[in-house]
Amino acid sequence: MNITIEEFLSLAKKYQALGSSTQRLLEDVRKGSFKVQDGVRLRQLYEFLLDLQFVQCGAGEVDQMVAALGRVLAEYQSEEEERIVSEKWVPEKGFPGATLWIQREDGKWTIAPSPKEGTCLGKCVKDIGSAKWFDKPLPLLVDGQ
């Protein structure tokens, strides 16, 4: 592993900032015995390992840990806890206008509850109360076709 001193110091600072409980979680993950108790610690550890993976360029153990934590996070994270990360105006077919669609962290889309641009960014899905999520924004068919 060849890294610059700046990369090393950056990783060291991030590791120190994780705190002892997350560092213990890292040890538990390395040993293969861990329980998911806290999604925040798990996400912090995952982000740290992604940085480490980038610096190490294909180190087997780190890649395996990133993959394992990615699977656990995907199972652990509730749809209600997803945050809104993007907005997009989609033209409506047969109507002179557009509908504001919002996207959550996992890439799913829904119609914004409010037509004001920027009102949902950063909010949790549970805070906006939308029911139906799609793989991509869809042009609305106002004439029922």
Image: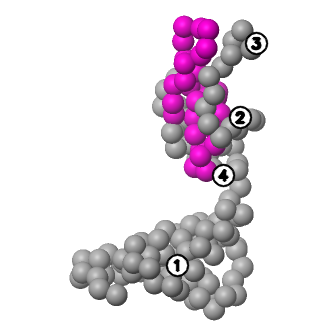
The residue to which callout 4 is attached is 81
The residue to which callout 1 is attached is 63
Report the span colored magenta.
87-114
- At label 4, counting other C-alpha atoms closer than 10 Å, the crowd grade (few under 14, some 14-19, many 20 or more) is some
- At label 2, counting other C-alpha atoms closer than 10 Å, the crowd grade (few under 14, some 14-19, many 20 or more) is few
Give the mark nearest the N terminus, 2 or 1.
1
Residue at image point 67% right, 88% down:
32
Residue at image point 51% right, 25% down:
89
The amino acid sitting under disc 1 is: Asp
The residue to which callout 3 is attached is 144
The amino acid sitting under disc 4 is: Glu
The amino acid sitting under disc 2 is: Ser
Question: Which secondary structure, mark 4?
Answer: helix
- Estimate the spatial distance between the alpha carbons at disc 4 and disc 2, rounded to whole Å: 13 Å
Q: Quadrant of residue 100?
A: top right
Question: Which secondary structure, mark 3?
Answer: loop
Residue 102 x/y as whole percent: 57, 35
Question: Which secondary structure, mark 2?
Answer: loop
Whether tag 3 and tag 2 are in contact, CB under 8 A, the answer is no
The residue to which callout 2 is attached is 130
Extreme-left residue of the structure: 5
State whether residue 17 appears in this view.
Answer: no
Residue at image point 69% right, 83% down:
34
- At label 1, counting other C-alpha atoms closer than 10 Å, the crowd grade (few under 14, some 14-19, many 20 or more) is some
Q: Is residue 34 magenta?
A: no
